[in-house]
Every structure is written in C-alpha cells, then in structure tokens.
Image (cartoon, grey):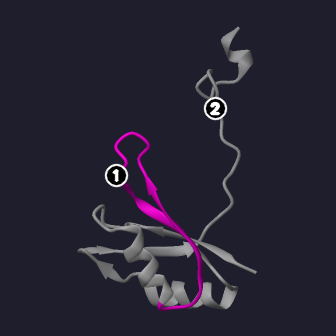
Amino acid sequence: MATNLYVGNIPFETTEGEILDLFKATGTVVKCDLILDKYTRKSRGFAFVEMGSQEEADRAVAEIDGKEIGGRQLRVNEARPRGERPGGFEGGARREEWR
C-alpha cells in the first residue's frame, strides 16, 4: 500500500524533478506534487510525495528528514489526512453568526 509523505521547508527555487530524484534514491515514487501558489505559480515551499510501500516511506523519512538542500533543512513526515475546512462565501463563519 502506498504511503503519502509531507515534505516541508523546501527552497523556493527547487523543482518537482529535483524532489522526485531525491526520493527515488530511497524507493519507488508513485507520485510527487510540488505545491504551487495558484496566482504566481511559484513554489509554496512544500510538497507531497507518495511512496510505493510503508517500508520505502519509512526509509525516505529516515534518510531525507533533516537533509540540507539550498541552505534549508527539509522536514519529512507521514502526511496527515486533510481535515474538514470551513469555506464558501461566508469566509468560514457559521451561518447562524450572520443572522
């Protein structure tokens, strides 16, 4: 079963290909998504990498977490599921608060 990893503190000039190459050295990479700002299309400094198995994900965390790239120490850990987020036209406020 594939495991999704969060990669943070990425230098803004780092490309998705460079992240992919870094993680390929530790195992099978199923997917790599460098998160970009929706307006500027520049890196937001974090990514999600999906590894082929739990063992490969554990190896990636052990080998890459804390590794320095471009003067910054990468932070790698298992990604948590995205929680429920407020949204919509109300800006996150509950409907009752508008009345």
Q: Quadrant of the N terminus?
A: bottom right
Instruction: Give the left or right position of residue 38, taking residue 84 as reference.
Output: left
Instruction: Say which amino acid is labelled 1.
Output: Lys
Q: Which residues are magenta?
A: 25-48
Of all residues shown, which one is farthest toward the left? 71
In the picture of the structure, the residue carrying the numbered disc 1 is 42
- Note whether residue 85 is visible: yes
Q: Secondary structure at mark 1?
A: loop
- Taking the magenta stretch, the answer to whether it contains residue 44 is yes
Q: CA distance from mark 2 to mark 1?
A: 24 Å
Q: Residue at x 53, y 84 (%)?
A: 61
Q: Quadrant of the C terminus?
A: top right
In the picture of the structure, the residue carrying the numbered disc 2 is 87
Instruction: Give the left or right position of residue 40, taking residue 99 as reference.
Output: left
Nearest the eye: 91 or 37: 37
Q: Position of residue 74 (x, y in %)?
A: 39, 75
Q: Position of residue 13 (x, y in %)?
A: 27, 64
